Image (spheres, rainbow, N blue to C red):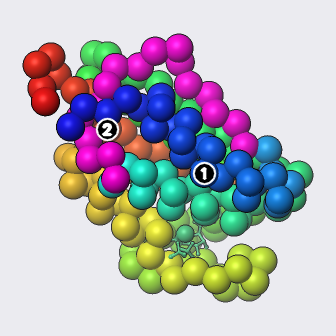
Amino acid sequence: KRVNVIRLLQYAADRFSMMSEQQGIRLTLEVPEQLPEAHVDQDAINQVLDNLLSNAIKYTPAGGSVALRAMVDRQQKKIEIVVMDNGIGIPARDLKRIFERFYRVDKARSRGQGGTGLGLAIARELVQAHGADIEINSKINEGTTVGFWIPVAEEGEA
Ligand code: ATP
Ligand code: MG
């Protein structure tokens, strides 16, 4: 299905505007004026965005910021979407296991907010189901960046 990515990201940012405001976090949406349509399952990408944005907000202290960004790689026919925060970060030793089901860094870190450790595992499965990939970069006490790409819809594609 052809999906308007700018609108998708706007709606995603809207879904989290209340929560981020309540937690004292600045949420910004940084997208180009135009993006080609993507060839994705809209529900799946919404789920990915919800999982990544909820993490960014959950693991960023008040006063911090979360950015949702998108850019296009026309050569490779990809749209890259990034969720970036300047929150608590993830220790290097945990990073390689972070996409495993039920893997959580440390329950004490999450400000008493619960979680099952499924969000990133599900996000990766959904992204990979599109033949795409997701990656995470993080530095403890500095922040976390999660990026994934989705395929641009080809000419004439439904
Ligand atoms: P769930 O998403 O199932 O409610 P969860 O948030 O704990 O629970 P994941 O979303 O899979 O599970 O994340 C796994 C772990 O990775 C988290 O417990 C947290 O320790 C760490 N993590 C994920 N995103 C971030 C982030 N943006 N900043 C810091 N740590 C993060
Ligand atoms: Mg989560």
Image side of residue 76 versus residue 71, left or right: left
- The residue drawn where x is 37% and y is 49% is 45
Residue 138 showing in the rendered view? no
View quadrant of ligand 2: bottom right
Q: What secondary structure is marked by label 1?
A: helix
The residue wearing badge 2 is: 150
Which comes before the other along the chain, label 2 or label 1? 1
Q: Does residue 29 belong to the magenta stretch?
A: yes
Instruction: Give the image location of residue 39, x and y in percent.
Output: 23, 35
Image position, residue 95 (x, y; %): 52, 65
| Front position in the image: 46 or 73 | 46
Q: Secondary structure at mark 2?
A: strand
Task: Please name the amino acid that badge 1 sits on.
Answer: Arg
Residue 14 x %, y %: 63, 44
Q: Is residue 26 visible?
A: yes
> Which of the pair 79/21 is nearer the observer?
21
Residue 82: x, y in percent?
52, 40
Q: Is residue 48 left or right of residue 55?
A: left
Cα distance in 3D space between marks 2 and 1: 21 Å
Q: Is residue 130 above or below residue 80?
A: below
Res 155 quadrant in image: top left
The magenta segment is 27-43
For residue 1, above or below residue 136 = above
At a point 31% along the width and 25% down the height, the residue shown is: 37
Q: Is residue 95 left or right of residue 105?
A: left
Q: Residue at x 50, y 61 (%)?
A: 51
- Tag 2: Cα neighbours inside 10 Å, few (<14), some, or many (≥20)? many
Q: Quadrant of the C terminus?
A: top left
Residue located 34% across and 20% down the image:
36
Q: Which residue is mark 1?
A: 15
